[in-house]
Amino acid sequence: MATGKIRAAIIGASGYTGAELIRLLAGHPDIAIATLIAARRAGEPIGAVFPHLAPHGLPDLVALDAVDWSAHDVAFCCLPHGTTQEVIAGLPRTLKIVDLSADFRLADPAEYARWYGREHGAPALQREAVYGLAEIARERIKAARLVANPGCYPTTAMLPLVPLVAAGAIDADEIVIDAKSGVTGAGRAVRENMLYAEVAEGVHAYAIAGHRHAPEIEQGLAEAAGRAVTVTFTPHLMPMNRGILATTYVRCADGWDAAGLRRLLAERYGAEPFVHVLAEGAAPATRHVRGSNACLIGVFGDRRPGRAILVSATDNLVKGAVGQAVQCMNLMCGLDETAGLTGLPQFP
């Protein structure tokens, strides 16, 4: 291991987010991948799970209870929701932790119980956790020990919406989010509805009026608005591996139009390395962000006066998951925020 580098562990290294974290951290100038944890595959080389990672000198997979945490500085937790609370509660407080599950995203434990069907198992840690949307909560993330990495849909929807809601430029009570995701957003577990024949050559809406990312979006918008906000949010599954496209319909506040919304967002994100507001008439696509930590935003005037359409695109595995996690870790550790994240999108 390289001397002087920050030593990282990946808990849940056998999933899609684990593999993507390895890809990004392997090229990070300040990070050494010290440990890869995957309980069901412990003892196997990472190449047995992901053959494309076999040639890169990575450590073998181990069980959680075999880890010497004194040899680590940061941990990324890539476990499913409901399993992370107990794991993180058992880790030493000397570790900086980025949790990619949903377990610490909702600030109110009662809301977590309502949407996830179980009581929160670590309410003290929940109170400590900082929601890690870096462009919105940068200073809080810098001071955090535990960061709740945002979901992919909330990231894609909130980046254009939060500045507009905070400025009073749109009516926060009239927001409709139509979002579409690739199948990797559902994880790597084997499920019938994720089989090729069930997904290919079709598009379908799911979790209609009941998706667990809705309260996460509403929580972020409520903080921006200073009051409760309720949105209409419908996700759709697309026959593609990765990417999210969110088309959001808003009503402009008095004195605002689509051009004004675009100017506001361009000014807000003008110095941001990963969020880019496109020129008038330009629409982002998932292929424009594939493999990158970018979020692209387009703003369009509706044919109905006083309304606008926001189109935002991210890669659900990068800016919607591990790229954002690395961005947060960079902030937590006092590193260059863009370290390990400067790769250009893959095209086509």
Image (cartoon, grey):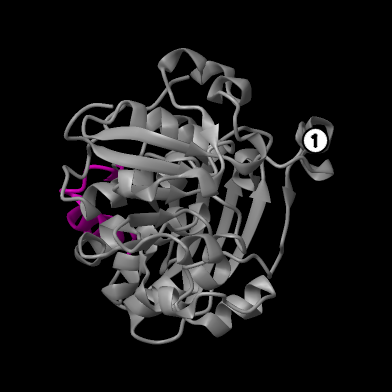
- Does residue 131 show up? yes
Q: Residue furthest bottom?
A: 227
First to last magenta residue range: 257-278
Residue 223: image quadrant is bottom left
Left or right: 33 with respect to 63? left
Residue 89, position as x, y percentages in the image = 47, 67
Q: Is residue 213 above or below residue 61?
A: below
* Nearer to the camera, 204 or 138: 138
How dense is the environment of label 1, judged by Cα within 10 Å: few (below 14), some, or many (20 and up)? few
The structure residue drawn at horizontal position 42% and vertical position 28%, both measured from the top left corner, is 23
The answer to which quarter of the image holds residue 233 is bottom right
Provide residue 204's location: percent of width, then percent of height.
75, 48
Name the quadrant containing residue 178: bottom right
Give the x, y percent position of residue 348.
48, 19
Q: Is residue 259 magenta?
A: yes
For disc 1, the marked residue is: 195
| Residue 315, x across and y down, in percent | 47, 39
